[in-house]
Amino acid sequence: MQVRSPRTVAGRGFILQSFYQLSFDELQAACDSASYLFNWHYKKNQREECRHNNISKKTKLFMSGVSLDVPTIERVELSADKTVKFLFKLHDGGRVETVLIPFRGKYTICLSSQVGCAMNCAFCFTGKQGFKRHLGAEEIVGQLVEAKRWLSENRPDDHRILNIVYMGQGEPLHNFDNVKRSAEIFLSRHGLSFADYKITISTAGYLPGLERWQKEMPTVNIALSLHATDRERRNELVPINKKFDFEKVIELADAIPRGDRRFVTYEYVMIDGFNDSDHDARALGRMLKGRKAFINLIPFNPFPGAVYRRSPDGRIAQFKNVLDGFHIPTTIRTTKGDEILAACGQLNSSPLAREGSAP
Ligand code: SF4
């Protein structure tokens, strides 16, 4: 593999290649201390360049041309349930949000893959922000690296990140190359060493990315945003449905190689009076019966300017009851961090949202 050449960024001229965009193999090809460096920066979480005597001159020379910069934490919001939302500032002034979701003293990290999002899903605050740009792999990896550092400095007793979900801002498969590269870096046994079943990449059904997934993506989990079973309502909630045929999307997701006990997760946002009737549950059950499917019911999370309301708890429980009759494993997602707009569908890093009003 070739180490990529340094990038130029419009208006900023020449910038250095980032350490956090390099796979282990690329680093190994470029210098002779890749294990040491992955251990130093990923396992030991070190910010500063390694100056240890074990590092060869060749490695030092190489690293002198490599940036260790990561997105900087501009703001941290904490909720009563221990959810943490970070606002990250990027090198060009762009911003993204990242969330740490607590579970029994450990965390799942929800990563962003783009500044804004082009998909414009109707139930999602990010969709209202519009699309600005893709994140580089180093900006995706950097969110986790900095969140880990923040945890070890601020919550040293419960600082483990066990799961990674690409469910923050952006459609991950629209930024396929950088998302794939970041997942490979997370998986490297020399560094962060996540197991593939601990990483989930979510998609609204971006067909070109799914077509590449089978051949190119490591064997991480996939989650598909379904939200409605008929064309008309899915067109409203997930407008790219008009462009990419959802039957083809499901077919492709089904064909993605997975371990014996792995499922495709289907996400279904529960909107009061819109898609939450028993009839809708039966349609969903019929659609997914016989597939290796896992359903995640997500109570709609309100945001400024939203036109939908969350289904009542009793309705969501009844919807699940109907699905249980189809013997499809189904969970209801616990809402965490909604008072700081950190729950599913609530992220928005645009200036207007940061000032407290919808764009
Ligand atoms: S739900 Fe995901 S794909 Fe849809 S607008 Fe929000 S971030 Fe983009």
Image (cartoon, grey):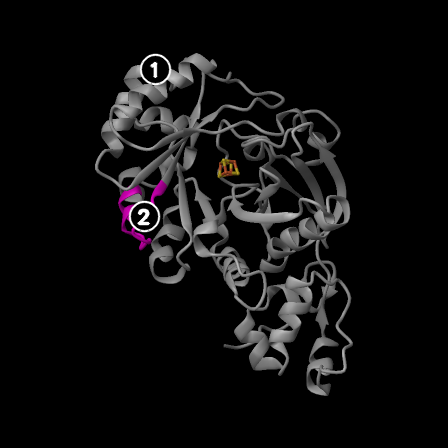
- Residue type at mark 2: give it: Arg
Q: Is tag 2's residue or tag 1's residue first in the polypeptide sequence?
A: 2
Q: Is residue 82 above or below residue 29?
A: above
Residue 138 x, y percent position in the rendering: 62, 59
Q: Is mark 2 within 8 Å of ligand 1?
A: no
Mark pair 2, 1: CA separation: 30 Å
Label placed on residue 261? 2
Mark 2 vs 1: CB contact within 8 A: no
Residue 334 x, y percent position in the rendering: 52, 28
- Residue beneath the point at 73% across and 58% down: 11
Q: Is residue 180 left or right of residue 40?
A: left
Q: Is residue 46 above or below residue 264?
A: below
Q: Nearer the viewer, residue 290 or 141?
A: 290
Q: Is residue 255 magenta?
A: yes
Q: Residue furthest bottom?
A: 57
Q: Is residue 151 above or below residue 13?
A: above
Q: Is residue 8 magenta?
A: no
Residue 165 x, y percent position in the rendering: 51, 45
Q: Label 1: which residue?
A: 277
- Residue beneath the point at 60% across and 43% down: 106
Q: Quadrant of residue 192?
A: bottom right
Magenta residue span: 250-264
Residue 349 x, y percent position in the rendering: 67, 38
- Residue beneath the point at 36% across and 47% down: 207
Kindly state the secondary structure of the residue where label 2 is placed.
Answer: loop
* Residue 270 shows up from this direction: yes
Badge 2 density bin: few <14, some 14–19, many ≥20, Cα 10 Å: few
Q: Quadrant of residue 344?
A: top right
